């Protein structure tokens, strides 16, 4: 077969190079222009006009934080979406259990970034671990083996009943991973309409599936489709065995199947409600009966906050899956979903993933937190300070019986009810702030204490004294 001159000219002008893609594994054809193209163009007497240069848009540099002074609040309002109701404080620095604002005021921090800064602020061990890792390598993606990730996974599994861990970046992501795992596990067992049961007043995160598991309608408003959240979720009242059994009957009727029961060991956002041992044992029994997964959300209660490393240890049950975040990185974003038995091998390559999840920096932070907990007997401190806090709050409740009510919680995850008709928990938190104490509401009527796990006896006495002054200021 003869090839025409024009065909040869075209083939000489264009070459096709096959380039492997690092992300998909497929080959991507790339067209490369040959140097002979210019000759071909000139021979056709085509005038090649240079393309006009696009106008360059100047990139403005970011502002220097030191120059903001008192304008950061205005900068927030102009540039940050209004998804948070913020207190009128601008934090400048922190050390141990104290935070200092830009105007020089110091506050005893019993919020710890909402149960996150377990080792307090500016902890030298955590700071050194993060700094050293940054000097080495901080992110590579999960295309490669990461020693820090392997070491943290080993510690998590060695100190629980889990067999394997999956890493992500937050509690919501960890719970999303658990939800996906439960659905895949149910699918492997032939269930095409999987149902996950969670509890009323629970909180599992803000992403869509985790929010669907969060059985609080106020968080669902505006995010439904035709009035419904993600399908496949049902609910019962926390610690109510009869309602749990009824929910399981619904979940196993009309062609549906029970995929999982998903619970917090202690409801945090729901008002500091500890789990009941009998309720959780019934949940374990029902999951075993229906070959479903028992998922425990340890995002707030885990990593030692309750006095045991994991909150479910307080309930004498072994979950199939549990999640962690918040204190896991001591303030560096990291989340994890741990699983045992068949659940640990349910996901395969491509079933779930995270670009940042388990990167060297986050896992170095997690390892530093884990080592600090072990080296400094942190669980003993949590147990002792938890009892001190419980006794102190009960004393204040008796002193102000028209304002303060029930004291609840475990370890350093404690709350006291605000029972006054004309005082909200938020108002008590604001009054405590005026006394130099940072607290956070849990629900509408509970004042929550979640201080760093390193808080001392003296610091906790100061916190109780400041709460006393705050309640007194509102009671009068």
Image: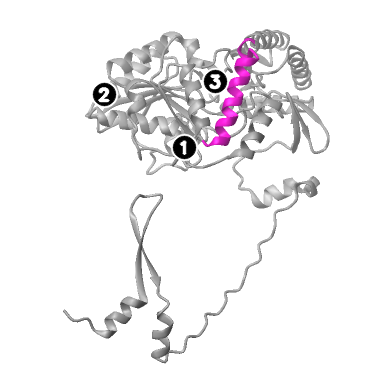
Residue underneath mark 1: 220
Can you identify the residue that label 3 sits on? 301
Q: Is residue 250 visible?
A: yes
Asked if residue 144 is among those painted magenta in the image, a careful observer would answer no
Disc number lying in front (1 or 3): 3
Contact (Cβ within 8 Å) of mark 2 with mark 3: no
Q: Is residue 361 magenta?
A: yes
Within 10 Å of the Cα at label 2, are there few (<14), some (14-19), or many (20+) other Cα atoms? Answer: some
C-alpha span from label 1 to label 3: 24 Å
- Is residue 462 placed above or below 132 in the rendered structure? above
Residue 30 position, x and y percent, is 37, 64
| N-terminal label among 1 and 3 | 1
Task: Select label 2 or label 3 by which is in front.
Answer: 3
Crowd rating for badge 3 (residues with CA inside 10 Å; few <14, some 14–19, many 20+): many
How far from the left and from the top, in percent, is residue 421? 65, 21
Compute the Cα span from label 2 to label 1.
Answer: 25 Å
């Amino acid at each position: 077969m003869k090839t025409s001159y024009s065909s040869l000219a075209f083939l000489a002008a264009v070459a096709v190079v096959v380039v492997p893609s690092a992300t998909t594994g497929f080959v991507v054809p790339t067209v490369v222009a040959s140097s002979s193209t210019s000759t071909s163009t000139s021979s056709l007497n085509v005038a090649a006009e240079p393309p006009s240069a696009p106008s360059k848009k100047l990139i403005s540099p970011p502002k220097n934080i030191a120059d903001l002074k008192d304008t950061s609040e205005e900068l927030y309002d102009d540039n940050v979406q209004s998804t948070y109701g913020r207190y009128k404080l601008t934090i400048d620095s922190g050390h141990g259990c104290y935070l200092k604002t830009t105007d020089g005021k110091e506050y005893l921090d019993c919020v710890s970034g909402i149960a996150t800064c377990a080792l307090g602020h500016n902890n030298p061990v955590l700071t050194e671990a993060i700094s050293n890792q940054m000097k080495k390598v901080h992110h590579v993606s999960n295309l490669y083996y990461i020693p820090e990730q392997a070491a943290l996974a080993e510690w998590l599994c060695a100190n629980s009943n889990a067999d394997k861990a999956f890493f992500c970046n937050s509690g919501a992501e960890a719970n999303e991973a658990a939800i996906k795992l439960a659905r895949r596990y149910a699918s492997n067992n032939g269930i095409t309409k999987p149902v996950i049961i969670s509890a009323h007043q629970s909180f599992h995160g803000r992403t869509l599936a985790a929010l669907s598991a969060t059985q609080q309608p106020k968080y669902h408003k505006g995010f439904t489709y035709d009035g419904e959240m993600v399908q496949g979720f049902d609910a019962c009242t926390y610690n109510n065995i009869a309602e749990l059994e009824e929910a399981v009957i619904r979940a196993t009727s009309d062609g549906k199947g029970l995929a999982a029961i998903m619970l917090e060991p202690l409801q945090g956002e729901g008002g500091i409600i500890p789990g009941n041992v009998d309720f959780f044992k019934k949940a374990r029994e029902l999951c075993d009966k229906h070959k479903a997964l028992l998922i425990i959300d340890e995002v707030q209660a885990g990593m030692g906050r309750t006095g045991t490393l994991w909150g479910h240890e307080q309930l004498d049950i072994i979950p199939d899956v549990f999640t962690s975040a918040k204190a896991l990185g001591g303030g560096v974003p990291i989340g994890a979903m741990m699983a045992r038995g068949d659940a640990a091998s349910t996901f395969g390559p491509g079933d779930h993933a995270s670009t940042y999840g388990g990167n060297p920096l986050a896992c170095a932070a997690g390892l530093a937190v884990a080592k600090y907990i072990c080296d400094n007997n942190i669980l003993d401190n949590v147990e002792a300070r938890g009892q001190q806090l419980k006794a102190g709050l009960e004393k204040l409740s008796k002193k102000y019986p028209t304002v303060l009510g029930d004291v609840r919680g475990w370890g350093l995850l404690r709350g006291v009810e605000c029972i006054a008709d004309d005082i909200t928990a938020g108002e008590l938190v604001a009054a405590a702030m005026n006394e130099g104490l940072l607290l956070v509401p849990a629900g509408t009527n509970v004042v929550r204490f979640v201080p760093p796990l390193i808080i001392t006896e003296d610091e906790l006495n100061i916190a109780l004294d400041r709460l006393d002054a705050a309640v007194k200021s509102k009671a009068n």
